[in-house]
Image (spheres, rainbow, N blue to C red):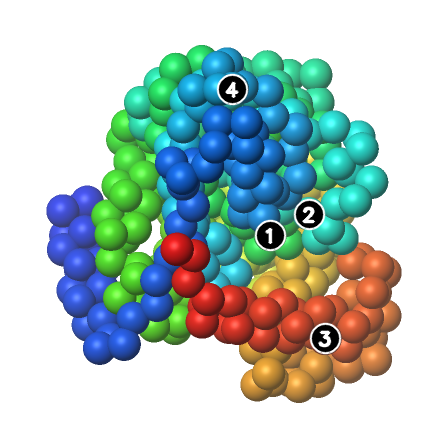
Amino acid sequence: MTHRMIKNKKQFMETLGTTLVAAEQEEFMVNISHCTTNEAPQSRKRYWEKIVTETYFPLTLTFKAESRFSGALNSWDLGLISLSKLESDGVLYQRNSQHLEQAESEESYLITIPDHDSIDFSQNGREVGCAPGGFILQRSHLPYQFSYTQPNRLWVMKIPAPLLRSKVGLPERLVSLAFDASQGAGDLMTEMVRMVSTRLDHMDQAARHTIGSHLVDLLALAVLDHSPMQSGLTSVQTAHLYRAEKFIRDHIQQPLRPQDIASACGISLRYLHMLFQMRGQSVSSWVQEQRLLFSDTSLQQHAHTKSIAEIAYEWGFSSPAAFSQLYKNHFGLSPSEARSQYRARLNQHQDHHFLVDS
């Protein structure tokens, strides 16, 4: 993607189109496709439950009309995230405590965009309805219910929690909120999702990874534009906190003292500390968390190409030993253990692309 400033949506989409054309390869990889058409009516529930579990995580399904149920699901690997298009008749999806006992160690978020009909979602004691023109966030590591009663098409991004947290502070606050996707960054994100899905089969791994990164960046802009993220803060305080967070992320590879952050944002040091205290963290702890989240993303992206020491120094840690200890305290496993998991997952994804579902 070009680094010059993009002034409007039309220019962005034209630039993106140029990027996609340049990325196409003579050899292409197919997407993963599933459909209930060839399944016997009595087998469709089990089949749909299996492919939904493989694409997202284990869920229990209840159909509005099981014997007549019809569904199709396409999914694409976009580097650290995945994109899928799910089209089906009405269904209720439930994630319960039994599923969580077998959950992956890494939490993820689903960003769901309905196309044809409204969806209903409840998680953590909160309920929300979302009509076409909006989107919602779902957490994998908490029980939830998700449903629609009429035939629907859903676009779904699955994003690892550490990656999303590196872009949006405390994304768990955003669960069970409906976001506007009819304008601004939200509109741009959903339009990009629909456009690139028709081109991804002709793109190499590096290009798909870049597209995935752009989608996460647009998501971060969309929720920051419209979400009541800092419920205990006034709009002015929220704006100051957002400016401080953005400055920290933009300079995360550099030494960052609270006084430098306050000066760069045009606020006092005392006011800066107050803003972060109101969100439940100190300035220093939030900076450290961001360094850890960015370094974890780097471990995933460069599982085969960068040493742990390189990653530690790149993201502002004083030594590999200090980085390893902080990383383990935060994520529950050492950087070398995490890298081994990311390598295995990457190899599995690469092997999977040689398989084609008929």
Residue 321 higher or lower than 50, as above or below:
below
Query: Image quadrant for the N terminus?
Result: bottom left
Q: Are marks 3 and 2 in contact (CB under 8 Å)?
A: no
From the image, state whether disc 4 or disc 2 is nearer to you.
4
Q: Report how far apart the C-alphas of labels 1 and 2 lie in the structure.
A: 6 Å
For residue 107, which numbered disc appears in the image?
2
Q: Residue at x 68, y 47 (%)?
A: 107
Sequence order check, earlier mark of 4 and 1: 4
Q: Report how far apart the C-alphas of labels 4 and 2 lie in the structure.
A: 31 Å
Residue hosting label 3: 340
Sequence order check, earlier mark of 1 and 3: 1
Q: Amino acid at mark 1?
A: Pro
Residue hosting label 1: 160
Residue hosting label 4: 66
Q: Position of residue 341 (x, y in %)?
A: 71, 69
Sequence order check, earlier mark of 4 and 3: 4
Find residue 254 and report its image quarter: bottom right
Assign a secondary structure to mark 4.
helix
176 and 309: which one is in front? 176
Q: Report how far apart the C-alphas of labels 3 and 2 lie in the structure.
A: 18 Å
